[in-house]
Amino acid sequence: MTDLRYGWLPERHLAVAATLSHADEIIGQIVDMLVGYQSQPDGIIGLSQVLAGTSTRATVSRVAPLPLKLPLLVADALVALRAALEHVLFAEVEYRDGTPLGSRAARLVEMPAAYTYENFEEWLRKRAGYGPPSLKAGSELVTRIKDLQPYQLNKDPQRHPLARLVGHTNHAKHRTPAVTAVRLATMYREDETPPRSLRDLPRLPETPIRVGDIIAETPLGEKVPMVLLPTIGINRPGTDRWPILIDELDQIAHWVRTQAVPRLVTGADPLPPPLPARYDIAVAHDDERAAIASGSWTTAAARMKARVGAASVRADMPTVVAQMHEELTAESVEAWFATVPDDVLVARMQQFQRTDTFDLDVMLRNVAVLESFRDDALAFVRDGNASSS
């Protein structure tokens, strides 16, 4: 039976769970800000039609400014994630060496992010004289640190989560907070068959969108309705990459929580389940292990995806479901949808299967999903929870 009290996590490292929870809470604040920003009534991007000879160019005329607090929160989340690694490393060094570290040795305790084996060897050499004994070449702790280094990802060390984490936090500490910007993830023609999934659409270049950018060009007099899917990107310092902000945070946080921390603590592959993404750190606990074990593994990023997906269902489905029974109205179905948790609603929608050909089995399964919506909405109405008139 899996030990939900995390027997692999010694007392000296219990506090790391709180640090990880704090990071997820900050990412949750970022999610709230992003959802509010992306839900603006006038949209994020404004377009104007500009004549260019025999063509018309759809040109960006407005980009809604991002809240200045956003990059500050992003920097806070990344710093908290790096602190989780540094705190585990420092506590492990003090435990292994058995004595409090002197100021000079303490300054040499840090989590490196080496792009090459030679870089890592240089980091070790700098600790050969005054560094803690547990950070000397050949030690068990050094082996654990070595296994987490970016150069182990031979093809592209810069893509390693540790390299990204250190790059972002160094930039925030020494220069400016995280650099974020609106970019266009993808777009498609509204008059064409909608994509089966956003993953089926071509990805546009990872560049910030600016006023004056040309989105599309069509012959004069021809109207081509387009669906734009903007997102918020974060610049990876020293590169021209602008990955999706929430994905970047989620990938780094996942690696720190499920890989880096367990490996630093145990030196082995992490045991299931991973530490929770979040537990209640706003109150004191008599039993911290029990509190950690009662936490949630659903990350802030996952909650955002469920929230956005549920909002889409609540906007598109009430009219469809209401047409399935005379006692239902769009308003009563909306009222029922509002009572269904985001993750539950998304999970139910994922039961739908799309097919480009006539497939009777798929159609019957999809009808069954709609009928389950109808039946639950009817029960909701008949219990007096909403007016069907």
Image: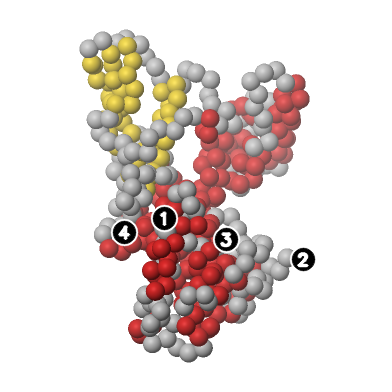
Residue displayed at 46% across by 57% down: 151
Q: Nearer the viewer, mark 2 or mark 4?
A: 4
Left or right relative to 315: residue 62: left
Q: CA distance from mark 1 to mark 4?
A: 11 Å
Q: Earlier in the sequence, mark 2 or mark 4?
A: 2
What type is the residue that disc 2 sits on?
Answer: Met
Q: Residue tagged by mark 4?
A: 171
Residue displayed at 59% across by 80% down: 11
Q: Residue tagged by mark 1?
A: 164
Q: Residue tagged by mark 2?
A: 1
| Secondary element type, mark 1 | helix
Quadrant where the C terminus is found in the figure:
top right
The residue carrying pointer 1 sits among few (fewer than 14), some (14 to 19) or many (20 or more) residues within 10 Å by Cα, namely: many
Q: Nearer the viewer, mark 2 or mark 1?
A: 1
Q: Earlier in the sequence, mark 3 or mark 1?
A: 1
Residue 290 appears in view: no
Q: Do the numbered discs 2 and 1 sit on residues whose CB atoms are within 8 Å? A: no
| Secondary element type, mark 3 | helix
| Secondary element type, mark 4 | helix
Q: Residue tagged by mark 3?
A: 258
Residue displayed at 72% across by 26% down: 362
Q: CA distance from mark 3 to mark 2?
A: 19 Å
**Residue 303 coordinates in the image, percent (x, y):** 54, 50
Nearest to the observer: residue 223 or residue 262: 262
Residue displayed at 53% across by 34% down: 199
Direction bottom: furthest residue: 99
Q: CA distance from mark 2 to mark 4?
A: 44 Å
**Residue 208 coordinates in the image, percent (x, y):** 32, 39
